[in-house]
Amino acid sequence: MQKFTLKAMIDQSCRLYAERPALSNVDGEPITYGQLRRQIDHVIALMREHGIRKGDRVAILSQNMPTWGVAYLAITSMGAVVVPILVDFHVTDILHIIKHSEAKLVFVSSLHYPKIGYADLKPMPQLVILDNFEPVKEPLSKDKLKGRFKHFNILKSKTRKASRRIGEEPKEDDLAALIYTSGTSGYSKGVMLSHKNLTLNVHLTCKFQKVHQYDRIMSILPLPHAYECTIGFLTPMHKGACVYYLDKPPTARVLIPTMQKIRPTIMLTVPLIIEKIFKIQVHPQLTRNLVMRKLYNTVPGRKMLHRYAGRKLLKTFGGALHLFAIGGALLSEEVERFLYEAGFPYTIGYGLTETSPLIAACTPSKIRFRSTGNVLDTLQVRIANPDPKTGIGEIQVKGDTVMVGYYRDKQRTKDSHTEDGFFKTGDLGMIKRGYLYIKGRCKNMILSATGENVYPEELEAKLNEDEGVLESMVYESDGKIIGRVYLNAELFNKKHNMRKMGSSQKEAFLQGYLQRLRDHVNQNVASFARIHRLIEQKEPFEKTPTQKIKRFLYS
């Protein structure tokens, strides 16, 4: 009988794939699953020496690196509860999470040690430097931190005798992870996920996402996010694949040579990343002269150019991709059309932290344009209170991958479920021929003066199709639909020589541009969804770690 615990899962992988590479820095030497097994045991012994027992909370505060995964698997294997913390959180939020979760021990990388190493936390949890699993006995000065810690290989030479006795083994319904979300509404919630929540989601994911022991996964999204952790880390670990981590921010200058070296077969990304690649690199090349623009404006010509650009993009990514997974937010229609017509091996998934996370997905060969795929086996999904005209309503889900609840918040847990036990996702969508389509967030929806539903995400997608718009946000103010747009300054300077304009001339030009953009969008939407005014957003929008705009800051 299959046991749905993270310990059972990783024990099996370490046994089946002992000689295969498991985790690696891009420029480092991979550790095998056999070595991973020994390192997990070592870290369990280390935690037990510091009094950690089953059910205790243990936090991880670090950038992506192989030892992050070692710590995560050790914590959950011994029955403790892992609290992954996003390094992009403000220091105040990081300290709040450590206090609120009552973490007894924190694995922290030397890079992020200053965020908590000098804090006045009472009680102060035991700190362990994640780079080499060295316990902190006294506060470390910046001089001591600099250059002190070598990376992953130090742990290989450790001679600590690791006990395989981990105490009482975790059960399926035991708490495995406590994930504090970074939402677009301005507050963090502690989402409690059990061993069964996570491992079942991994197993269900594998039914559509074909992963095998020879796959190479390039990890560029933050590991504390449920999407990257479950799909980009736990799923490869279950199947014996190898995950590679960057030791630098994933800029184009860093990524391109890295992908040529690793030749990843699987990558996970968020819409903003692929949308920027399309807008800044792909689209300008496809429309760089009059002949190509005329060709691109015909359907057959566009499809031909998309196929050509798709082959070129695949080579840029190393030439070996069989799965390019996109999630975390809505993908623009224009960019998906490019991927679809290019025959790029993409798939779009849908889920939330509260659902471990995946709810719906499909293989690249079964993609339906603008859909997030089929609902995963064993999950029940329904559309609540659907609009009689469109069939759009709130997506609600029930099943064994839905969270245990919100940590220390019974009322919010109760409010998040219906009386018959369905979790209210807060997302709007519809189901058509078995495929799920996402339309936006319930809280973002605008009710027009005539009583019609307006979905800001659809208007934003139309605004973002303009080459001069990098990103946008649409909201309601005093009964009117307002749009904010962050413009492509580099493009304007190049095409219109704006650097030589005076301030009044520049302002007049931009206002004229915004007016033309508004008129163009309004010609292509229903009368009740027309934008009343467009405002230039001077700075990039503040975003969550998965690159969703923090709407509460602007509306």
Image (cartoon, rainbow, N blue to C red):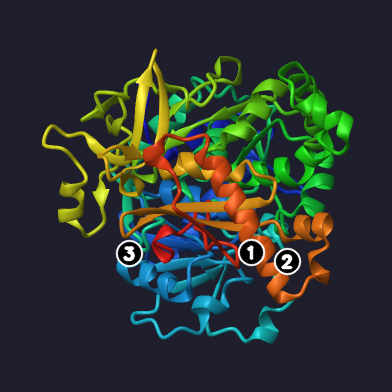
In the picture of the structure, the residue carrying the numbered disc 1 is 131
In the picture of the structure, the residue carrying the numbered disc 3 is 101
Q: CA distance from mark 2 to mark 1?
A: 7 Å
Name the residue at 64% across, 52% down. Answer: 470
Looking at numbered disc 2 in the image, what kind of residue is underneath it? Lys
Q: CA distance from mark 1 to mark 3?
A: 23 Å
Q: Secondary structure at mark 3?
A: helix
Left of 547 or right of it: where is 98?
Answer: left
Q: Secondary structure at mark 1?
A: loop
Left of 24 or right of it: where is 180?
Answer: left
Label 3 or label 2, whichever comes before in sequence order? 3
Name the residue at 83% across, 62% down. Answer: 497
**Image quadrant where one finds the N terminus:** top left
Looking at numbered disc 3 in the image, what kind of residue is underneath it? Ser
In the picture of the structure, the residue carrying the numbered disc 2 is 150
Figure check: 129 above or below 162? below
